[in-house]
Image (spheres, grey):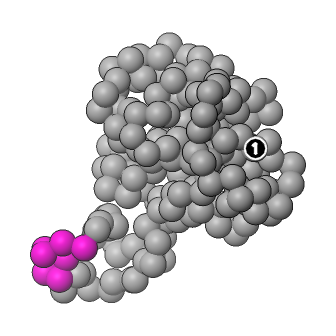
């Protein structure tokens, strides 16, 4: 499997933190080459100490979107994880696609707002748009027909992590060999890395 060089837009949020954890756990598969935060400069500086070769950018203030686009189009990156809340990741995502980068989307807002444009651009450039959100990632795996056997999955079920809901107890009781997954984002990011490396 080849090593992916990844930019994380939104590196200080929960998905960004999970992605950094995955990069620490799978350094042979994932190298972080760029990271952004909206306004948490100190948290981003701390993250930068862990990945000293990564380029850092703060998106708050004048020119913030341009800084995100600059990260998203770095020549050394081949994947951009869009983990920005809301629609702030749309222009950087489109710029990454135009630059030939695969994108991993943790924020569904950009696809809700401009899914047709994003997917058309991705098809035109021959790049992948990969879902990181747990439920979307599980559906994506089924639709792509790329489910792999893993010791963490029962032989007759595909498990999707979900936020606590009234139906969870009923679903959990129907699984013959459940596994507790403490952080669904880490699992989804790991799956994206495993399938597409």
Residue at 75% of width from left, 29% of height from top?
74
Callout 1 secondary element: strand
The percent coordinates of residue 46 (x first, y second) are 76, 62
Which of these two is toward me, 21 or 66?
66
Give residue 86's position: percent from left, percent from top: 39, 40
Residue 157 colored in magenta in the image: no
Identify the residue at horizontal 19%, vertical 76% (top origin).
168
Q: Residues within 10 Å of mark 1 (few under 14, many from 20)?
A: many
Which residue is under mark 1?
56
Q: Position of residue 138 (x, y in %)?
A: 35, 55
User: Looking at the image, can residue 44 be seen?
Assistant: yes
Q: Relative to the observer, which residue lies in front, 72 or 174?
A: 72
Above/below status of 188 relative to 59:
below
Q: Position of residue 162 (x, y in %)?
A: 29, 66
Q: Nearer the viewer, residue 160 or 17?
A: 17
Image-based side of 122 in relation to 171, left or right = right
Residue at image x 50%, y 13%?
A: 124
Note whether 154 is above or below 158 in the view shown: below
Q: Is residue 87 left or right of residue 168?
A: right
The answer to whether any part of residue 100 appears in the image is no
Residue under the point 43% across and 77% down: 181
**How many numbered marks appear?**
1
The part of the chain drawn in magenta is 164-171
């Amino acid at each position: 499997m080849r090593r992916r060089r990844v930019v994380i837009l939104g590196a200080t949020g929960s998905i960004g933190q999970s992605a950094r954890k995955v990069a620490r756990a799978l350094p042979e598969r994932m190298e972080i080459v760029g990271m952004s935060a909206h306004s948490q400069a100190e948290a981003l500086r701390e993250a930068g100490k862990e990945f000293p070769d990564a380029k850092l950018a703060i998106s708050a203030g004048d020119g913030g979107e341009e800084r995100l686009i600059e990260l998203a189009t770095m020549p050394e990156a081949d994947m951009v994880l869009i983990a920005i809340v809301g629609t702030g990741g749309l222009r950087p995502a489109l710029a990454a696609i135009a630059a030939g980068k695969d994108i991993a989307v943790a924020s569904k807002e950009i696809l809700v707002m401009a899914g047709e444009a994003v997917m058309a651009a991705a098809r035109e450039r021959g790049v992948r748009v990969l879902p990181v959100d747990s439920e979307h990632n599980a559906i994506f795996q089924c639709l792509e027909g790329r489910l792999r056997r893993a010791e963490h999955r029962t032989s007759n079920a595909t498990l999707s992590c979900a936020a606590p809901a009234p139906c969870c107890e009923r679903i959990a009781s129907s699984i013959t060999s459940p596994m507790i997954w403490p952080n669904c984002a880490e699992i989804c990011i790991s799956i994206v890395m495993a399938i597409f490396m």
